[in-house]
Amino acid sequence: MDKLLIQGGTPLSGEIAISGAKNAALPILCASLLSSEPLHLTNVPRLKDITTMLRLLVQMGVEVEDLGADGLVLNSRGLDNPLAPYDMVKTMRAAILVLGPLLARHGEARVSLPGGCAIGARPVEQHIKGLQAMGAELHVEHGYIHATAAAGQRGLSGARIFTDMVTVTGTENLMMAAVLAKGESIIENAAREPEVVDLANCLVSMGAQIAGAGTDKIRIQGVRRLHGATHAIMADRIETGTYLCAAAATGGHIRLTNTSAAYLDAVVDKLFDAGCEVRSERAAITLQAPARLKAVSIRTSPYPAFPTDMQAQFMAINCVAEGSAVIRETIFENRFMHAVELIRLGADIKIDASNAMVTGVDHLDGATVMATDLRASASLVIAGLVAQGETQIERIYHLDRGYERIEEKLGQLGAKVRRLR
Ligand code: EPU
């Protein structure tokens, strides 16, 4: 298993380009299942999760052409195996996103139940409830969701769906199912995340009729068929935020291109409060860190509030800030696994259920730590960049799921980072 070796203490400086968004690319890859014509995607990040999703689609019968820097072309005209097996779903929960599109176009799907993961139980009953409201029959047997709709492409019927909580992939799955359903669907309490909007934009360019994406009420008028399209995946706002935090923590000065602050208001606001200067251009962001950061309290919530996917990184910066801060996690019940590893580096963190009290210390000391999930790993990288001496991060396959060429990008910013294979 690869490890990352970080020699801390260098302020990050320089410029890097941000990659396409993992959490936009994953549902959009699944959208290719909705048409028999080619879907050309550009700005696709080259990540482990993307490779896993492509492997899953290929074994279903989707043809994938890799155009290198020009992106990917997916063609699902030969789709013949609507199955998402356990061994793939267990490594990447986003595989559940094939359920809606498979049902809509194929009338049938067999998708393994994802089960729990390192950050919480993460059930998918809202996906199931919504698809049932559209007329699909779903039952769980031997750990698999078996789903069928009346034969033919228009087996699903439009429905009014209210999700019990805001769910990102739930909204995306239901939106993809509704685009080929008969009549109108309304998703209430929909996720407003920018990645949902990016998916909607891609679907619209394929001929779907969708209004209200980006609000909590999405209206979809089903159409008979979707056609091919070309779509550029949006920039990764979480990768952007992660590098901003790394620069902030190390007292650095960086410029990030191929991205925008447009979807990062809550994060940029907190970086301001921490004492950073953040300047936003049309397609770039610059951050200049202060001599010492001020601790900032955060509370995670669905978009547009502070994202849970940035919570761990802010815990890392609070570890070396002046003062104390409370971090409240409201989305996932078990997303503080990084805290115990940060404590091994000398951080002062006290956990009480879903609250973490972090008191800044003068310095962190390098040590060997273990990555437990994707964003937890990012927080350990940030802490390692600040810590005195050497930090070794184990199990970085988590990091490779969501950060493209991380050691190369950090190296470009002057960090001393090496991968041990
Ligand atoms: N939930 C249910 N039942 C459901 C669906 C969700 O109880 O049927 C709960 C979840 O357990 C959680 C909350 O609702 O407590 C929100 O979960 P959501 O469904 O929004 O999460 P997700 O769609 O599985 C996506 C991202 C996550 C990100 C969350 C929250 C993708 C592929 N994943 O997950 O990204 O943390 O939304 O914003 O889009 C990551 O990139 O590191 C990551 C974990």
Image (cartoon, rainbow, N blue to C red):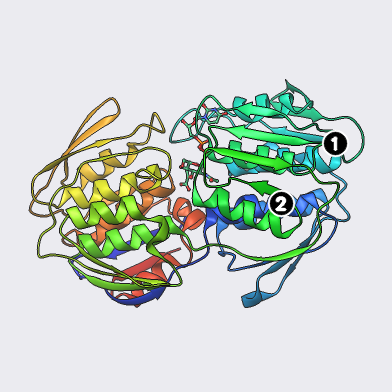
As drawn, 409 above or below 238: below
Seen at 53% across and 32% down, the residue is 189
Q: Could you say whether the residue bearing mark 1 is in a helix, strand or loop?
A: loop
> Where is residue 88 drawn, in percent x and y?
66, 43
Please say whether residue 87 is visible from this viewpoint.
Answer: no
Could you tell whether 171 is left or right of 243 in the image? right
- Residue assigned mark 1: 107
Q: Give the residue furthest to the right.
A: 151
Seen at 61% across and 25% down, the residue is 125
> Where is residue 148 drawn, in percent x and y?
83, 29
Which sits in the foreground, 166 or 319? 166
Near mark 2 (Cα within 10 A), the count class, few <14, some 14-19 or many ≥20, is many
Q: Which label was assigned to residue 31?
A: 2
Q: Could you say whether the residue bearing mark 2 is in a helix, strand or loop?
A: helix
Q: Amino acid at mark 2?
A: Ala
Answer with the quarter of the image where residue 358 lies.
top left
Seen at 74% across and 36% down, the residue is 184
- The answer as to whether callout 2 falls within 8 Å of ligand 1 is no
> Where is residue 374 drawn, in percent x and y?
43, 48
Q: Amino acid at mark 1?
A: Gly
Could you tell whether 132 is left or right of 182 in the image? left
How many marks are shown on the rendered structure? 2
